[in-house]
Every structure is written in C-alpha cells, then in structure tokens.
Image (spheres, helix red, strand yellow):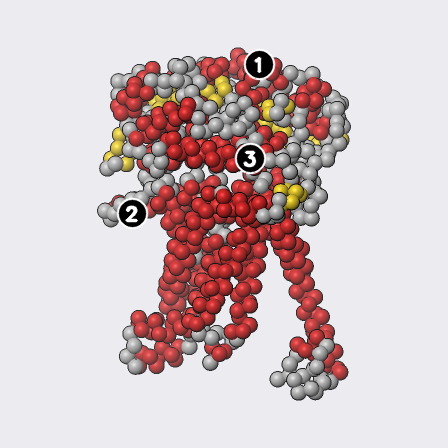
Amino acid sequence: MTHVAPAVAGGPATTTGTAAPPRRRRRLDREAIAGYLFISPWVVGFLVFTAGAMLWSLYISFTRYNLATGATTPVGLDNYRELLDDPRVATALGNTLFYAVLAVPLEIAFALFLAVLLDRVGKGAGFFRTVFYLPKMTPAVATAAIFFLLLNGSNGAINRFLRSLGLPAPQWLVDPDWIKPSIVLMSLWAVSGTMVIFLAALKSVPRELYEVATLDGAGPWRLFRHITVPMISGAIFFNTIVLTIAAFQIFDSAYLLFWRDQGSSAPDASLFYAIYLFQQAFRQFNFGFAAAMAWLLFVIVMLVTVVQVRFGNRFVYYEADR
Amino acid sequence: MTPMNTARRTPLLTGLALVTAAATLAACGPGGGGGGGAGGGEPTDFTTAPTGELSAWAFDNADDVGEARMEYAAEQLADVDITMDQTSFDAQKFTTRVAGGQVPDVVQMDRRFVPTYAAQGLIQPLDACYEAHGVEADERFYDFVVDDVEWDDQLWAVPQFYQPPAIILNTRVTEAAGLTDEQFDTSKPDQLLEAVAATYTAEGGTPTRLGFDPVATGQAGLWVLGMGGQLTDEEGRPTLDDPSNVAGVELLKQITDAQGGYAQVKSFSDAFDTFGDANQYVTDQVAAQVNAQWYPNVLSPYIGQVQLRAVPFRGADGEPFAVAGGSAFVVPAGAANPDAACAWMLALTELDAWEAAGEARAATREEDGGINTGLFTGSPEADQLVRERWVVETGDPGFDQVIATYYDVLDYGRTYGASPAGQEITNALNNAVTEALLGDATVEEALADAQHAAERAYENVTAEG
C-alpha cells in the first residue's frame, strides 16, 4: 500500500522512493485540504475555548486574579502551596478518590450485566434497549429530585424495600458513611451510555467461538470468562478509562443532592473536588487557587490514565495485533 | 471489532484524557485574556430624571406583588425603556457576565451575597444614589434590614422583604397532649423538651410525628444568635468559635436527640409534603415547627383542615427574637445606566409601590377566596399600611393569631451581620451544626472547624490584589 502521509507533507512520496503521479498527488492534496477544512471548526474551537482557556488558567494559577479590574498579581507558587495547607482540598480529594474507587468497578459490572441481558433478548430487543437507555436521556436535575425521594432515610422507597426484607435502612443522605454510596447508586442509574458500548462490543463477538466452545463442553460461566470478556476487553478498557475520568470530575449529582440549596447544610462527605473548585472560583472569587486546583486534578487524571493505559494494555485483546 | 493497532490507540486514549481534563481546566478560567472586568463604570451623580435603557436581571419570582410594583416603577420612569431577564440569580453567571463586561443595570440577589460582591468591587456603592433621591435608608427600611446591606460604612443595595421566623403550633396535637402554647418556649429548654416528649411519636425507631421541628440547619443562625451567640464581629470577620455560640447548637442537639437523633429528624422532615395537600400540619406530622412568614400563605388554603396558632421564637433572655435574610437590588460595577437603575430600585421600594402591591394582592385574594396574610416588605411604613388596609379577620381565630404573631415579632428583628464572607459563614455554621448533631464532633470542635473554614473564606474574599 502506498504511504500517503509523507506525500501530503511534501516529503518523499513513498518508502520505495517512487513519486505518485502528479494527478493523483493533486487529488490527495485536495483531499487533505478538504479534511483539514472539515475538522477546522473543532480545531479552532479547541484552540480558542479549550487550549486557550487552559493556558490562561495555567497563568492565573500563579497569580491572584481580581475579577473587577481584570488585574493579575503574581504570587509565585503560593496557590500551589495553599493546596497543601487547605484541609478541605485533602477532604475533597479523598472523597473523590473514594468515590472513583467505589463507582467505577460497580458501573462497569452493572453496565456489563445489563448489556449481557440485552444481548440475549430476542423479541422486543429494540423496546428494551430504548427503556434501558431512557435514564441517560433524563436531565440530571430530574434524576436528582427523584433520588432525593428514593433515598430518603425515613420514607424513601429504597429504605421501605430494605425494611420489608428485614435489612437495616441507612440514612443515605444524612449519615456521612452512606453519602458516597448514595451518589454511586445515582451514578448506576445513568450507566446506560456505558451499557450501549458494551452491547456493541458483545454483538461483534463471533458466534462461532461460542459454538465451538459449547461443543467442547464449556458452560455459560466459562463462555463468559474465556470468550466474552477477552473479546470485549477493549470496550472494558475504554469504559474504565472514561468512567475514571468522569469519576474524578463528579459534580452535578453531588451538587444537586447536597450543595444546590445554599441555605441548608452539606456534609463534608459530599464535598467532591470539582465542587470545592467551583466554590473557590465562583463563590469566593479565588480564581488563582481554583486554577491551581484544576491543574492538580489534571495531573492526577493524567497519571491515573497513563497507569491504566500501561497496565490495561497487557490484558486487552486487540484483534489487529493477532 | 474495528482493527486498530496499539501504537495508535495509546495516544488516542491519552488524548481523550487530555481533552476531558481540559474541560475542567477551561471551566475555571474566569474570562480569558484579561482586561475584562467590570471595574470601570463612569462615576455618576445618580440624576433623578434618568433616560435611556435599563436592563434588569434575576426577577424570576415576580408574582402579583412584584408585577404591581414593576408597573408602578415603570410609570415613574416614563423616559426609561426597561427590559427584564426573568431567569434566577446564579453566582457563576453573574461572575461570568462581570468578567465579560456584559452586566445588566440592576440585579436582584440575596442580601447575604451583597457584602461579598461589594468587597470584590463587583457592585457599586449606593450612598450617592440614596442621597440624590433624598431617601434616608434608615427611615425607609428597618434598621436590621439596612444593616444587612451596609458594609465598610457604605450602602451597597436597596433591600426588600423581611420575612421573620416564628413557631407555628399544630394545636390539634398540642391540645390533645394537654399542652399550652406557652410551653413551646425556646428560652426555657427543660419545659420545651417536656413538650417535645409529650408530642413526639415513633414506630420502630422512625418518627411518625415530630414534637418540634427546629429546622436545625435551615435556621441555624436563628438558634445561635437567639441563644446569645454571634456569627461575626463588627468588621464582618467570622466568630463562629466564640463560646457564646455553643448554647444554641447544644439546645438544637437536645431537641433532635429527644426525637430519635438528627438523622431521623432530618430524613423525616425532608419527606414532608411542605407545599402540598398532605403537608405536615394537615397530616399532623408536626406539633410545632419553626417557619418563616411566607409559610402561613402556603397553609391558608387548608383552613378547616388545620388548627394553628403561633408563638414567637424567644431568645435566651425570654424576649421574642427574629432574624431573617431577604433579597435586595444591586447595581453591578460597569452598569451602563446606573442613574436609571438607582431611580428604578428606589421606586420599587417606595410606599406607593407597596400600596400598589397591597391592592394587587388584595384583588388576587378576593378572586381566589384566599386569606391575605399581609406583606412583609422590609419597610415598616409599608408593612403598617398593608396590615391596616388589607389584612382582615379570616374567620379562623387561630389563623388570625398566627398572622398577628408574625407582625408582632417584627419589632424584635435582628441582622445576621454583614460580612464579605456571609454566605460561607452560613454554610460553615450549617456544616458545624450537622456535624455536632450527628455526634461526629463535640459542639466546640465542630464550631472550631467551621471557624477555620469561614476564616479562610473571609481572608480570600478580602485579600488585596
């Protein structure tokens, strides 16, 4: 196959040193230009609204920023030192890590369970797929309002169910020990986006693998363990990374359940990193510190992702590598 | 599965992480490029004959009272073209608009925010506005309402509304328990706790009725200040660890512990159908509850289904005590037409505007057959006028007594104290109360933690730079 990229870049046309015919080369140039034009809105948007804002936030993380005048006063590393001095940063980071460790495996397991169920449904598969996906379409505010009622420690449906089974009924929204699990429950409700990716992966597993293994006497668990999981390991890996990043940035569910009403109390157990960052920026106007918090989170997410990529690649089956 | 080699996939996933993390970073960039800011509106003498266009924001709660006042104010400013944004106030949106230099001329916000924005230079001082229009704030408004918006010896807002709290009794329950109204006296804890014990009921450890819902976190300031505490010093610096604050939180703990503990009380009260047909007074889920003045309006359609009276919240000295927030109008720094803003805000809060509002409310009540519980405006003269002219006997002596109690406690109003960290102090106090009532810390420890958080917020907001 001809190597296209060097030709576009104006370098040697092929690895064999044979130049592409002029007409074909012009067509490739036009295709490249068209390609760049098509992606240019995203590139411009990224540079202006994301990369630009990132650079600006990096700059103000070394300053004290006055919103009224737009003036910035250099403070060196003070904002980063403050990250260590402020005990609520550690609290927020600890809560966020705890949530991520609890939520991501449960979300993966639950989404996979739902996907396997849907994969096996024959009649009415479209109906069930739609029903299972509906929570994803529900606005976060509506979901939070529903869960506020469901999780009520006194009369909530979840506790009524638990009591009917003779099980202890926790104070989900009041007891600090149960606050993070309550938010995890809410996250599980909206796991259908992950489920759809798993479902697509399950549909692409060759059926003959199951047939052969079944002929060899493999039971459902062995089929799942030795065929399904390896064959969808790419999707598991992808979902794990995406959900981990999302978990580190958790904001809306906790904010809506605990922090929306500023006249009421919100236990420290519900103080997640992004919420504290928001408070520092938009309630205390401490933009330099908030920017430093954002960069700390960025570094943490990057490190975790790099570790996941390096570690995860060992266990992921890539069809193209075989 | 789509073929894809590992070498291309790793940077792709890293890029994914980069982009999503970048979203967080981008979110905390306040403006971009610098220089924005509100800062520089031209100095004005706040002329009494303004012209031009006026934009106002955060008027999302305009009911018959609000509309009548706006109509009145618009008539007074015939040469001004007024446009209203009726979305609710949002701190992030306000900050963003200020950073972008796209500020409206008037914003309605909670009074607890006012000193915070003043300390940041995001709103304009209004002493000259009051002076230009010959308005004495102390004469037009209650002293304690003016105190809410006065900081650094300057006035920063035009206040409106003061809806004090009191204790609404469910006499169907209290009388069945053989209790008198006087036994719900917050200045006599032992007597109060006896009344709580006589009316509290539970099944399997879960409350079925609260003897007294103190609204521990929603009204934490009332309890702490009422029992002799102080939230801030004269400069607005937080004083949450002041020993005088302990009594209020300890009394709250005694009240909630007597009813199964804070977690049970909170969960039970969170499930109240507060605004509905099965509200806590109709269903006898409370014998007594602290409520702000607006709540009798909610209960008024249920006359015949509820039996109510009210008693004042009493401070440690046995005297009635009230503290409440409310909303106010401010002019952002950099507003295009501060002259019109000033004239409009003052027109909205003058006696004739409230008279128009009183008439509108009376008409609404006549139409829907409801009860007029009065207006609690922040202006003593207006309150008096509305009460005398439109608050009439309802035919339910208990409900009449409830309305009268709220009017009576106006004489005992107090301010939370203006502070640049006002909202953060409230939050820190609420968190301390929660922590102490749950038993996760002693009252002193919880207040000390809260003081650290509030102090840090105060330092941030008032830091030079």
Chain hosting mark 2: A
Nearer the N terminus, badge 3 or badge 1? 1
Task: Return the residue at label 1.
Answer: B381
SS assignment at label 2: helix
SS assignment at label 3: helix
Chain hosting mark 1: B
Horizontal arrangement in the rendering, residue A86 relative to residue B119 (left or right): left
Task: Return the residue at label 2.
Answer: A161
Chain hosting mark 3: B
Identify which residue, B167 or A244, lies in the foreground. Answer: A244
Displayed quadrant of residue A202: bottom left
**Residue A44 horizontal/vertical position (percent):** 68, 59
Tell me how many marks there are.
3
Q: Residues within 10 Å of mark 3 (few under 14, many from 20)?
A: some
Instruction: Give the amino acid type for the residue marked by disc 2 in the picture.
Output: Phe
Identify which residue, B142 or B32, lies in the foreground. Answer: B32
Instruction: Give the amino acid type for the residue marked by disc 1 in the picture.
Output: Glu
